[in-house]
Amino acid sequence: MFELTSETNSDEIPVNVKSDNEIDSDESEESQTLSTNVEELAKLLDTEKEKVSEYEEKLKHVLADFQNLNRKTQSDIEKGVNAKIDEFVLDFLKIYDDFVIAKEVFSNNKINSDGLDSILKHMDSLLKKYHVVPIDALGEIFNPNFHEAISIINDPDLDDNTITKEIRKGYISHERVIRPTLVEISKKG
């Protein structure tokens, strides 16, 4: 087509008129540029989606590690506290055993043991309050989880490994044996 330009007249507006071929060419170039940009953006989006997926997986692993560490730390703290409590209870039980022996001696010698009875009742209630319970063993079958055999007697009337005598009382605290019962067990002839 033609191009109107005015070099002489300043009131005229310059107009560039393009042919249909030139317009189609420009549109085609724009279309190609847009499709190239869309493809690049789609690739970038896919790349970013992969990165997000990787980061999500890493975050899940870090969170799982944190939860495991938290559980282990709690467990270690509980075990440490329980070990110290068990140590204290074992020391307390030694004193308790001495009071029981003293009461037996007083009773055998027909000496008034009312004071010791009162102390032992308080000690029993303290043990009960903190879930420390004695292991009943007499007449039971020997169980190495709860009992420690220190002597064996021959008795044809009893089954093997029947506990015939408690030498020292054992105790359980919070479903843990803190002191096994020392026992005497039977063996058949």
Image: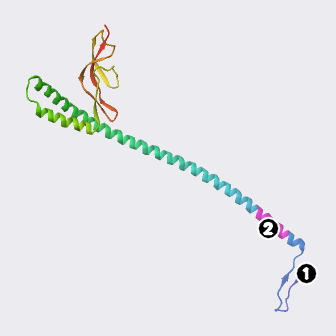
Q: Main secondary structure of the magenta part?
A: helix
Write down the region rendered in magenta: 25-35
Q: x, y (%) of residue 37?
A: 74, 62
Instruction: Answer whether residue 33 is magenta in the image.
Output: yes
In this rendering, would 109 be left or right of 84?
A: left
Q: Relative to 165, is 98 above or below?
A: below
On the image, the x and y values in percent for residue 113 come to: 11, 30
Give, as a three-letter code, the residue at label 1.
Answer: Phe
Residue bearing the label numbered 2: 30
Element carrying mark 2: helix
Q: Is residue 116 left or right of residue 164?
A: left
Where the C terminus falls, by quadrant?
top left
Q: Nearer the viewer, mark 2 or mark 1?
A: 2
Q: Residue at x 13, y 32 (%)?
A: 116
Q: Is residue 160 magenta?
A: no
Above or below for 53 versus 167: below
Give the quadrant of residue 161.
top left
Look at mark 1 in the image and give the residue it sits on.
2
